Image: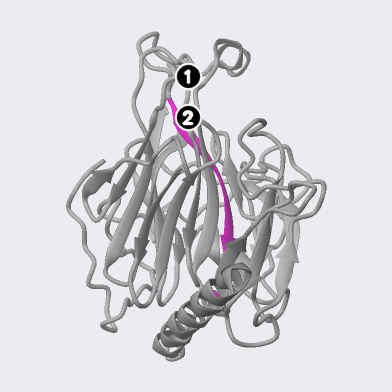
């Protein structure tokens, strides 16, 4: 009997978590979300080779299936080498597998936003969108998700437009706002964290030890901000809506000289590099980046030129970083209208 206790305890745990998964599943059935079961699993003891294992507890094809991380990425959150791939455990009915994924933005990948600023759309087409210094623009605007970007920039003497970078992102959904922003720093240091996370207008601290994550859970949604390096790099997950990898980086001295940005000596122009992965966008999604995910979307930019430009600043500009209002914005939120109209400035 003594040897059977661990098995009994595990069976009880599986039943309890399964019941919890069922309750959450029922609460989200009436929402426009992707498969919410992808992250419903219980971690098991590691395999004899040191690979992490998980037991899927969501009902469906993966129910009670054990998944083992591949040898190429034995851990979900590699700590010794933050640049290596991590193990992604997916208990959704369409996948039911453990695969390796990089945990940093790929600036050449789909849904990326990097540099000054350069996008790669959901259609794979690269384009630039300059915005304006101090402006806020809707990157994605859909019925249940809205993402704004705050632009910083500089205009060297003799130029007709600003050089711009994205300094902050605001993710608006349900009745919540999540802001990820780069702090203004005069001198850059890779070992000093220049990243701020703000949840519903209150700053939160993302731990650097243990699971190295901040988490908010309620009946409808799980939000996770997880460090993917000791400083300046996180992965943000909003269940059923999106996942995004974010990294803070400065304008380096060489980069400044090559492009003649003429960055002030007392400002490193810390900004964000980001890669988005979306779930369940509607066919009418709007936004600078969002519209490139529409079915049969045809990009208007001139492919093949050095800097293909995407216009539309007037259509996508919002009154503030936390406002989901613009000329073509679609966000409705849980009440059926755009009720989130933030006044805080970051």
Q: Main secondary structure of the magenta part?
A: strand
Q: How far across and how far down the image is residue 13, in percent?
A: 50, 74
Q: Is residue 346 magenta?
A: no
Crowding near the residue tagged with mark 2, few <14, some 14–19, many ≥20 C-alpha atoms within 10 Å: some
- What span is in magenta? 270-281
- Discs 1, 2 touching: Cβ within 8 Å: yes
Which of the numbered marks, if any, corresponds to residue 52? Answer: none
SS under mark 1:
loop
Residue that numbered label 1 is attached to = 191
Is 180 drawn above or below residue 239 in the view shown? above
Is residue 161 visible to us here? no
In the image, residue 183 lies at what x, y percent? 35, 29
- As drawn, is 163 to the left or to the right of 109? left
Judged from the image, the secondary structure of the residue bearing numbered disc 2 is loop
Q: Earlier in the sequence, mark 1 or mark 2?
A: 1
Q: Quadrant of residue 138?
A: bottom left
Residue ID at (65%, 73%): 91
Asked if 330 appears above or below 79 in the picture, the reply is: below
Determine which residue is flagged by label 2: 231
């Amino acid at each position: 009997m003594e040897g059977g206790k661990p098995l009994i305890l595990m069976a009880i745990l599986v039943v309890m978590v399964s019941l919890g998964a069922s309750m959450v599943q029922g609460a989200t059935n009436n929402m426009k979300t992707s498969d919410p079961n992808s992250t419903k699993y219980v971690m098991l003891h590691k395999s004899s080779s040191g690979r992490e294992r998980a037991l899927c507890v969501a009902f469906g094809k993966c129910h009670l299936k054990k998944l083992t991380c591949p040898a190429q990425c034995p851990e979900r959150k590699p700590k010794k080498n933050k640049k290596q791939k991590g193990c992604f455990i997916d208990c959704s009915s369409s996948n039911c597998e453990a695969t390796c994924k990089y945990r940093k933005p790929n600036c050449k990948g789909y849904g990326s936003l990097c540099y000054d600023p350069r996008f790669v759309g959901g259609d794979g087409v690269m384009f630039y969108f300059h915005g304006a210094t101090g402006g806020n623009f809707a990157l994605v605007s859909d019925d249940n998700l809205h993402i704004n970007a705050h632009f910083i920039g500089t205009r060297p003497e003799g130029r007709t437009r600003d050089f711009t970078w994205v300094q902050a992102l605001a993710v608006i959904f349900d009745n919540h706002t999540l802001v990820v922003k780069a702090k203004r720093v005069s001198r850059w240091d890779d070992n000093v964290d220049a990243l701020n996370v703000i949840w519903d207008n209150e700053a939160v601290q993302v731990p650097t030890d243990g699971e190295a994550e901040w988490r908010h859970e309620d009946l409808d949604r799980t939000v996770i901000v997880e460090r993917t390096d000791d400083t300046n790099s996180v992965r943000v997950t909003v269940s059923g809506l999106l996942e995004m990898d974010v990294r803070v980086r400065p304008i380096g001295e060489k980069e400044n000289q090559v492009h003649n940005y003429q960055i002030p000596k007392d400002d490193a122009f810390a900004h964000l590099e980001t890669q988005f992965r979306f779930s369940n966008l509607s066919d009418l999604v709007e936004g600078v980046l969002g519209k490139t995910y529409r079915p049969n979307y045809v990009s208007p930019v001139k492919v093949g030129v050095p800097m293909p430009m995407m216009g539309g600043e007037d259509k996508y500009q919002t009154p503030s970083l936390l406002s989901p209002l613009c000329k073509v914005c679609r966000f409705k939120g849980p009440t059926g209208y755009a009720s989130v109209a933030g006044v805080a400035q970051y």
